[in-house]
Each structure stands twice: as C-alpha cells, then as structure tokens.
Amino acid sequence: QQQVKQSPQSLIVQKGGISIINCAYENTAFDYFPWYQQFPGKGPALLIAIRPDVSEKKEGRFTISFNKSAKQFSLHIMDSQPGDSATYFCAATPSGTYKYIFGTGTRLKVLA
Amino acid sequence: EAQVTQNPRYLITVTGKKLTVTCSQNMNHEYMSWYRQDPGLGLRQIYYSMNVEVTDKGDVPEGYKVSRKEKRNFPLILESPSPNQTSLYFCASSPVMTGGRKETQYFGPGTRLLVL
C-alpha cells in the first residue's frame, strides 16, 4: 500500500522559533504534495502545496522543501507564533489519479 | 459564501442501522471526496468522485457506499454500520483543471459518528 510517513508526531516550539515537519514517501510517482493545517473542531485547510518540478516554495512564513531523489518533503514554519498551534498533515497524490494519501499528522504547539 | 456542508454534524447510532451522511458544495466543483480521521492514523480516503456518475475507491472503501447523481451532492452511505466505523468524517471538494492539474481541496466541518 502506498504510504506517506510523517514525523514528528508532536512538536513543541518556542515563539519565534522554526518548526520543521518532515514527510517521506515510497516508490511511487506522486505529482502533488499539499500541506494542510487543522485547528480543533475544524476541517483541514490547505496551507501550501508544491509540485515535483520545483525544489522549494515559500508563502509568507511557510516554506516547503522538496527533495525528489530522497523522496522527502518538509514544511518549515519560520518565526512560529502561538496562532500556528494546530495539527499539520502532509499529503501526496499519485500521478494520473485523484487519490490522496495523507501522513499521520503532527500536533504543533507554539509556546508564548 | 463558498462552502462544503455536511449533515449531520454529530450522530450516534447502533450497529446495523443504515445511515447516510450528506455532503453538499456550492462551488460547482467536479471533484468530491470522503475521508475518515482517526487518532494516530491521520486522514484516510474512503471514496472520491471526478464528476457525476463517476466514483472510485480510496484506501478504505470497505463498508461504505457513495453516489454522485448531482454535481453538488456526494452522500456517504453506511448500509450496516459497525463499531469500527466510529470516526470523524470529512467531505471535500475541488475543481478539476485541464490536464489533470490538482488544485486546492476544500473541506467540510466534519461529522462525528459513534456506532454502538
């Protein structure tokens, strides 16, 4: 079964610090790598996404780094804020399909 | 307001009693999908639909049915619910772009189901 492995399971960061969440995928061609943010009691919402033809994408304080050869991609949150405290999910979609395979999630807590 | 709505938001039922969770979107999206979210397992895709009358299995379709008779609606049907289907369910939709380029999925608020 296709998998996306996400780590860490939980993360505590001081305000102003950098939060880093990692995901790795196995031997499958994926063509879309979105990250979702979920607050308690809410549905996930797209945060940022990358396609495999670029190695990095930045939107404000959020950056995705993509390493195609290592089959890894990561989310970096710069200058982390208490309002960033949420659960983050990475995902990947196999080429030619609209299946979505999600990681198991990372619960981020940013201390004030 | 552009949104995905789900009903009911909370549901307690008993084993074997058929139920339907409705999902509707007002964004004219072709793609709709159902997920379940369980602690430690993340989100797992149950079924998805690329357009009216076109549905396909996700990773965990067993015990679920779907239908897509109208573009805006994508109900999830549990013919004979069992306790292992106790979960938080999300519906999502997105546009389908030319060439298959994937775009943002918009999620509903979730339906919490307890099967006794």
Image (cartoon, rainbow, N blue to C red):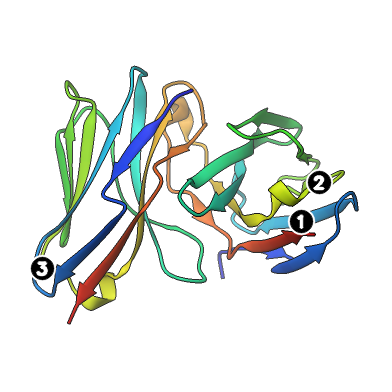
At x 63% / y 39%, what residue is drawn?
B46
How would you rate the neighbour count of disc 1 (Cα within 10 Å): few for under 14, some for 14-19, many for 20 or more? Answer: many
At x 66% / y 28%, what residue is drawn?
B56
Marks 1 and 3, how far apart at CA: 40 Å
The amino acid sitting under disc 2 is Leu
N-term mark: 2 or 1: 1
Tag 2 near tag 3, CB within 8 Å: no
Residue B96 falls left or right of residue A10? right
Residue B49 falls left or right of residue B45? right
- Relative vertical location of residue A19 with respect to residue B28 in this rendering, above or below: below
Tag 2 near tag 1, CB within 8 Å: yes
Are the numbered discs 1 and 3 placed on the same chain, yes or no? no
| Mark 1 residue element | strand
Numbered label attached to residue A79 = 3
x, y percent for residue B14: 86, 58
Marks 2 and 3, how far apart at CA: 44 Å
Per the image, the residue denoted by label 1 is B21
Numbered label attached to residue A98 = none
Numbered label attached to residue B78 = 2
* Badge 2: chain ID: B
Residue B36 falls left or right of residue B10? left
Marks 2 and 1, how far apart at CA: 8 Å
Tag 1 near tag 3, CB within 8 Å: no
* Badge 3: chain ID: A
x, y percent for residue A53: 21, 27
The quarter of the rendered structure image containing the N terminus of chain B is bottom right
The amino acid sitting under disc 1 is Val
x, y percent for residue B9: 69, 68
x, y percent for residue A107: 33, 61
Q: Nearer the viewer, residue A3 or A51?
A: A3
The amino acid sitting under disc 3 is Asp
How would you rate the neighbour count of disc 3 (Cα within 10 Å): few for under 14, some for 14-19, many for 20 or more? Answer: some
